[in-house]
Image (tube, coloured by chain):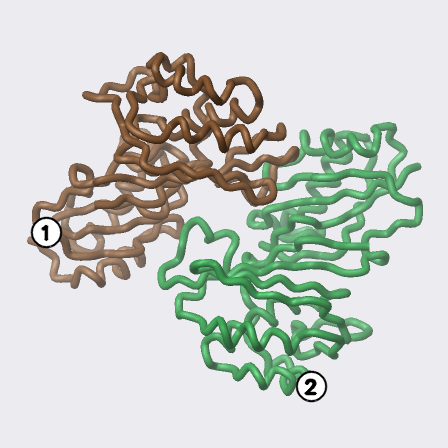
Chain colours: A brown, B green
Amino acid sequence: MTNIKLTIQYDGTNYCGWQKQKNGISIQEKIEDAIYLVTGEEVNLIGSGRTDRGVHAQGQVANFITSSKVPPSRFKYALNSKLPEDISIVKSELVADDFHSRYDAKGKIYRYLIYNGEIRNPLYNRYAYHVPIKLDFQSMDKAKNYFLGSHDFKAFMAQGSSVKSTVRTIKGISLDQKGNLICLTIEGDGFLYNMVRIIVGTLVEVGLGKIKGDSIPHIIKSKDRKMAGHTAPAKGLCLEKVYY
Amino acid sequence: MTNIKLTIQYDGTNYCGWQKQKNGISIQEKIEDAIYLVTGEEVNLIGSGRTDRGVHAQGQVANFITSSKVPPSRFKYALNSKLPEDISIVKSELVADDFHSRYDAKGKIYRYLIYNGEIRNPLYNRYAYHVPIKLDFQSMDKAKNYFLGSHDFKAFMAQGSSVKSTVRTIKGISLDQKGNLICLTIEGDGFLYNMVRIIVGTLVEVGLGKIKGDSIPHIIKSKDRKMAGHTAPAKGLCLEKVYY
């Protein structure tokens, strides 16, 4: 038996998310189906974490146990030939028997794309959040730094989520502007449910002048979801990297 | 009667191209339908030129004559409310009665995107040509300059096209590389049918070592389509700008 680690890219537009479920086609299911076609085995593909309906990935990680004799580095070619065009395996490799995509993850990098033009741009429809009102980039850029470090991010978690601890550490956050595009890159040891999207929604409201940038420490301390901004749409979000 | 100029963006994936035709839905038809819904008039929307099935635009230009009282600058909002998400009017303005999108065009800028990674990337599937073999960027970058200036580009026109003159002037050409992405930007006074896509196919073959960069002047002089490279796929192409 060998443990194979996959690095995965996908356009999440047409899927119900990473996680297998009854009411829709998931990325996990599509890849498990491809593994079945290649190996004849019904494996349990362990992802580093769920991504929601419509969220994309450039570096999702998952692993599975197989008795197949396909050389680990060749698995990607075999799987890609069975996968639809909106899912790609960019790397397949042998890992230690006890490697676990979720438990062993040390951190993740997400990026979030905003299209800040008056009129929606069809070429960014699938991959960016359209904010038609001009955002104050400088205010957003200054405000973003309040998220750095270890905090209890309960105010930035979707209500109704259950998790042992709501403390997370943001190790890096950057905001870049190029023309009408604003890109947030955020790195953390882990993220609560909808955390990146609520951080983005909050920064957008800072950019709109609805929330004061320097009130973010107060919002964090409140641990109250209602104090933070809206949840930015899934389609702007992309899981860039999971590291171990 | 007023003459209205539109600046248009679209994702061409789901259309048979700009030009209205019987066997498919075109961008022109969609916008004419929207104009009908707004004004009650069946107009003839004159585009700056056709774009093929699957080609995108960030700055297509078209004009139409109307007796509508909608203020010219407000037309974009009225039309966008009737258009699907993959077509946007980014600007609408009053122009002189004799302005003609096609005849008056002084030049166009196209960009072409290549994804040069071993494995196809789902996030660039719709917008880039996937070339899985590593391209020699330096050779391509050097070779591109042979296209600059006025030449008879008959070798770079789809066979069977009929046109008075096959001489065109390339005013600018640049090639940029960022990670696995290679972007060609090309500006000319006009382009023959499939000309940009054949130039890209030729440069890709230079990058693959199939065509020598310094043989491009010879290919141009031959006026023989068979001497040039393949026609790169439509989906990598985007009409960036038409200027007057």
- x and y, in percent, of residue B163 in the image: 78, 71
Q: Are marks 2 and 1 on the same chain?
A: no
Q: Residue at x 24, y 51 (%)?
A: A6
Question: Going by the image, does A166 lie left or right of B105?
Answer: left
Instruction: Give the residue drawn at x 52%, y 36%.
Output: A114
Residue identified by numbered label 1: A96
Spot occupied by residue A200 in the image (x, y as percentages of width and height): 45, 29
- Location of residue B112 by image quarter: bottom right
Residue A210: where, in percent of width, then height?
55, 18
Observer-side mark, 2 or 1, equals 1
Give amino acid for label 2. Answer: Lys
**Element type at mark 1:** loop
Which SS class for mark 2?
A: helix
**Subunit of mark 1?**
A
Q: Which residue is mark 2?
A: B221
Q: Is residue A99 left or right of residue A210?
A: left
Point out residue A44 in the picture as x, y percentages from the top left corner. 16, 41
Residue A225 placement, left or right of B32: left
Which of the labelled discs sits on residue B7, or is there none? none
- Marks counted in the figure total 2
In the image, residue B95 sits, relative to residue A83, either above or below, namely above
Q: CA distance from mark 2 to mark 1?
A: 60 Å
The relative height of residue B113 versus residue B4 in the rendered view (above or below) is below
Quarter of the image with the C terminus of chain A is: top left
Residue at 57% x, 20% y: name it: A209
- Amino acid tagged 1: Ala
